[in-house]
Image (spheres, grey):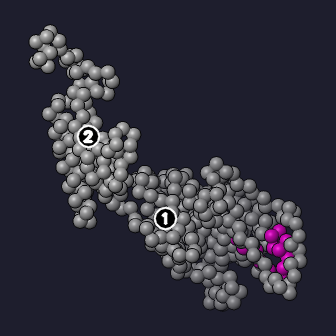
């Protein structure tokens, strides 16, 4: 510059833009100070980019712009050019690189890094510290969840207060079997499927053979559409059954409902069942208030359901306050049952000896129709939408919730 000035020349510069260069990105100092830095462990962290940005640095591959890192080696340099002096920018690189090296060293020793992180990164890192180790899990949730998704969804709550951690707890506590892929998560209320859609949608797609978030569910409860099924050979078919679940809109689901909500569900359902007519008419037996004779008869009929002992259900908090507000309804012919507040608000079952599946399914459809009509008269309805069909606790039962066998 001094030599140029002697010849009457000078660099382009003004006090607003500093040194004038072709590209606006280089205005100010035009300075880029950098190092080739090997940080393989640090660069694998989901919030690595957040750390780099917080330090006013940038990274690229050692081959230059638009090249990828190889072996965890990055070209690390200052991201700012304008508004800072040359000394300030080089100092940012020196301080930032020293911090990155210290974090890498901590990671090499499996030590904590939280205290080293820039303050702007610490908040997101707090949530990430709660991210579960899913490396040995075999369930749909574990296959679909990742640290970035967890960071995005973990701060969220449904209007009722249900969280992502509660949704996935059963999948965290129960890794699954190497040959049996469990779901690994549950809903705590109807809104869970929308608030946490970013994790529920891929789980549903994985569990339901590619069912996408844009797909619509088709409901058909007209038994006249069934072809055959009147006489499956009773020599081979000993009994037939069709069952499903239904949830009552406005109440929390069993993993998250309050005692009051559970009682509310029982009240809504039993009022509807009191209106059953014809061959569907029967009696409701509350688990907490039945005689020994009634209990023994339900056991003999194989109708009674017990307190959950499955680790999957216990981790989902479905056994709370047992047996309060749980019960069983069956018609006089003992071939139509409704379980209340077990795994779902209701479990509706039609069954009988022999192979007349058409008759079983017809009774099933008629029973659901009568219950729903009675509920609607009281201003209540089942949880349903055109995408997921009938909403139930476990994503595996969405749609129809139906199991015929």
| Residue depicted at 51% across the width and 63% down the height | 143
| Viewer-nearest of discs 1 and 2 | 2
Q: For residue 200, which quarter of the picture?
A: bottom right
Residue at 66% in and 64% down: 246
Near-viewer residue (100 or 313):
100
Residue that badge 2 annotates = 77
Q: Indicate left or right for 139 with 49 as reference.
A: right
Q: Quadrant of the N terminus?
A: top left
Q: Would residue 238 appear left or right of 395 to someone viewing this image? A: right
Q: Which mark is residue 154?
A: none
User: On the image, numbered disc 1 is attached to which residue?
Assistant: 142
Dot 1 lies on which element?
A: helix
Secondary structure under tag 2 reads strand
Q: Which residues are magenta?
A: 348-363
Q: Residue at x 33, y 50 (%)?
A: 48
**Between 38 and 330, which is closer to the camera in this rendering?**
38
Separation of disc 1 and disc 2 at Cα?
Answer: 36 Å
Residue placed furthest toward the top: 8
**Marks 1,2: beta carbons within 8 A:** no
- Left or right: 366 with respect to 175? right
Where is 14 relative to 45, above or below?
above
């Amino acid at each position: 510059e001094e030599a140029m000035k002697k010849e009457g020349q000078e660099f382009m510069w003004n006090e607003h833009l500093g040194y004038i260069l072709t590209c606006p990105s280089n205005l100010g100092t035009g300075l880029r100070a950098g190092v080739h830095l090997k940080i393989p462990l640090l660069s694998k962290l989901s919030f690595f980019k957040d750390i780099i940005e917080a330090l006013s640095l940038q990274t690229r591959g050692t081959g230059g712009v638009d090249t990828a890192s190889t072996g965890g080696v990055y070209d690390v340099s200052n991201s700012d050019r304008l508004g800072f002096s040359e000394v300030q920018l080089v100092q940012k690189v020196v301080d930032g690189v020293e911090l990155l090296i210290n974090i890498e060293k901590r990671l090499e020793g499996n030590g904590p890094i939280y205290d080293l992180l820039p303050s702007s990164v610490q908040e997101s890192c707090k949530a990430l510290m709660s991210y579960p180790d899913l490396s040995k899990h075999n369930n749909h949730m574990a296959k679909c969840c990742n640290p970035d998704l967890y960071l995005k969804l973990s701060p969220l709550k449904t209007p009722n207060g249900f969280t992502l951690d509660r949704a996935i707890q059963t999948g965290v506590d129960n890794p699954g079997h190497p040959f049996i892929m469990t779901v690994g998560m549950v809903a705590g209320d109807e809104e869970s499927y929308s608030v946490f859609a970013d994790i529920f949608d891929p789980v549903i797609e994985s569990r339901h053979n590619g069912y996408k978030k844009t797909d619509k569910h088709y409901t058909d409860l007209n038994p006249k559409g069934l072809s055959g099924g009147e006489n499956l050979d009773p020599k081979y078919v000993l009994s037939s059954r069709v069952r499903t679940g239904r949830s009552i809109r406005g109440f929390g689901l069993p993993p998250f409902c309050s005692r009051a909500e559970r009682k509310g569900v029982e009240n809504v359902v039993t009022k509807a069942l009191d209106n059953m007519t014809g061959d569907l008419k029967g009696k409701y037996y509350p688990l907490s208030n039945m005689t020994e004779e009634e209990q023994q008869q339900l056991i003999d009929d194989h109708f009674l359901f017990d307190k959950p002992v499955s680790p999957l259900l216990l981790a989902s908090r479905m056994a709370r306050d047992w047996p309060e507000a749980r019960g069983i309804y069956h018609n006089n012919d003992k071939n139509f049952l409704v379980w209340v507040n077990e795994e779902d608000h209701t479990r509706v079952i039609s069954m009988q000896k022999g192979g007349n599946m058409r008759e079983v399914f017809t009774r099933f459809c008629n029973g659901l129709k009568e219950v729903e009509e009675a509920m609607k008269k009281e201003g209540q309805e089942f949880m349903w939408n055109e995408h997921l069909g009938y909403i139930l606790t476990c994503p595996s039962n969405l749609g129809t919730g139906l199991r015929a066998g």
